[in-house]
Image (cartoon, rainbow, N blue to C red):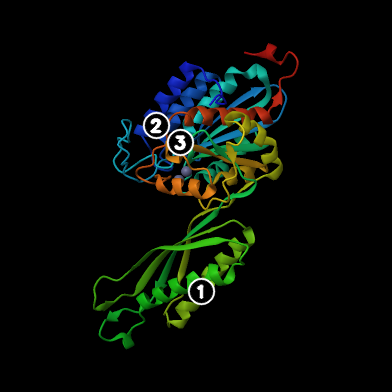
Amino acid sequence: MGYVAEMDDALLGRLTTTYRDLHRHPELSSAEHRTAGIVAAWLGELGYEVTTGIGVTGVVGVLRHGEGPTVLLRADMDGLPVTEATGLAYASTVDGVMHACGHDVHVTCLLGAASELAADRAGWSGTLVVAFQPAEETARGAQAMVDDGLFARVPRPDVVLGQHVAPLPAGTLALRSGPAFAATDSFKITLHGAGGHGSRPEATVDPVVLAAATVLRLQTLVSREVAGGDTAVLTVGAINAGTKANIIPDRAELLLNIRSYDPTVRAHLLDAVARVVRAESDASRSPRPPEIEAIEAAPAVVNDAAGVLRTRAALEGVVGPGRLVDPGPVTGSEDVGVLAAAAGAPLVFWLLGGADPAAFRGATTVDEITRAMAAIPSNHSPSYAPVEDPTLRIGVAALTAAAREWLAAASMGGGAELP
Ligand SMILES: [Zn+2]
Ligand SMILES: [Zn+2]
C-alpha cells in the first residue's frame, strides 16, 4: 500500500519470531514473569535504563537523549483464561490460557518502536519511557504500577500514548477524541434470605425471588434513569442461588458489570445500583442488609482533544489518507487512563487494525463494515487471530511516529552526544 513505514528485515523477522513466542506462551494477569523477562532483556540490549518488578511484573525502560519532553509509550502484557481454538501453528501451548486480546501484539509493537527510536536517537531529543504493564484484563495493573511508585522511579511523562489491536482491517488505525473506551465497574452482590423447606415459603425469605426482582429492577436503571443522549450498559452476568428444587436457600449472589462514558452517569448508576439492591432487599423482608463488593473498576479512556489533534497527522502518515477512522465510542474498557491520570498527562490511545482485510472486501458503507466486523472473531474469542502482516509493522510505525511527534526535533549537533 506504499504507506507502511519501511522496516529493517532483520528487525521485522526478530519481532515476528518474538510475537509467535509470546503467543505460544501466554501468561495470566500479574503472572507475566516470562514475558517481563523477554522485555527486560530486549530493552537492556538496546541501552535503556530498565526497571523491573513495578506492580509485581511491570517493566519500564527509559532512554534519555538531551533536552525535551518526556513521552510514555504503553503496552499491556497479560493473556486470558481462554482455551485457544485458532488452529494457528503458533497457538498457545499453555492449557486454558491464551493471548485472546492481542496483548502479545502490543508487547511486540512496543519492542519494535523501542528499537526504532533507539536506533534513530539522532533524530529526536527528550526522554522516552516505554512501559510494559501487567494485569490489564483485571483492570488492576496500571493502578498497581502507580501504587508501586511508578512516577517516583521513572520520569513523569508529558503525554501517554498507546494502542489496542481491534477487529478493524489490518492497514487501518482508529482514533477518537474525548471518551473512547467505557468506564467499567464490576460488583459482587450478596442478597440474604432465610432458608427453609420449599413447601413452606411463608416460613422463609426467598432469595431467589429477591434476586429475580432485583435483576429486573436493575434493568430499568439505564432505560429510566439515564438520559436519551447519554449511554451506559448494565449486565448481570451471573446469578447463583440454591441447590435443590424443594429447598429455599438462604442467599443469592449476583455478578454485575456497568459500562459508562460520562463520570456523572457513572456516579449516578453506582449509587442507583446500591439503592435498588437495598430497597429490593427491604421489600423482600431480607433479614440482613445486602453486601455490595466492588471487584473491578477502571475509568473511561478519555482522549485529550488537543493531543488527538496533534497525533492525528502522524498516524495518518503511517497508514495513508482515509485509513485513520473514527471508531465511535467503544464499550470495551482499558485501564491505561489510570497511568495518564496519575501522571497528570494527556492521553492519546488508538485502535490498531488487525483483521484480515479480505474479510472486508467490498464493504464500503459503515453498515457493511460493521456487518463484516461482526462476522469475524473479535478480542476475547477463542478464535481471535489477528494477522501478523501488516499489523505488526503498522503497530510499530504508529507508536514510533506518534512518539516522534511529541518528542522534540533533534537540536543542532544533538547526534554528537550519542553513546
Ligand atoms: Zn481484553
Ligand atoms: Zn486488551
Calculate the distance from the C-alpha at mark 1 to the C-alpha at mark 3: 46 Å
Q: How crowded is mark 2: few (under 14 residues within 10 Å), some or many (20 or more)?
A: many
Q: Residues within 10 Å of mark 3 (few under 14, many from 20)?
A: some
Query: Which image quadrant for residue 376?
Result: top left
Query: Which image quadrant for residue 305?
Result: top right
Q: Can residue 157 be seen in this view?
A: no
Which residue is under mark 1? Answer: 276
**Which three-letter amino acid code belongs to the residue tagged 2?**
Leu
Q: Return the x and y of residue 401 as percentages of the image width and height.
A: 62, 28
Which numbered mark, 3 or 2, is in the foreground of this view? Answer: 3
Is residue 205 found left or right of 416 in the rendered image? left
Q: Does the residue labelled 3 lie within 8 Å of ligand 2?
A: no
Q: Nearer the viewer, residue 372 or 47?
A: 372
Calculate the distance from the C-alpha at mark 3 to the C-alpha at mark 2: 24 Å
Q: Residue 22 carries which label?
A: 2
Q: In the image, is residue 109 above or below residue 120?
A: below
**Which three-letter amino acid code belongs to the residue tagged 1?**
Val
Q: Return the x and y of residue 72 as percentages of the image width and height.
A: 61, 34
Mark 1 and mark 2 in contact? Answer it, CB < 8 Å.
no
Tell me which label, 1 or 3, sits earlier in the chain: 1
Tell me which label, 3 or 2, sits earlier in the chain: 2
What secondary structure is found at the residue carrying circle 2?
helix
Which residue is under mark 3? Answer: 357
Q: Residues within 10 Å of mark 1 (few under 14, many from 20)?
A: some
- Locate the C terminus and report the quarter of the image it occupies: top right
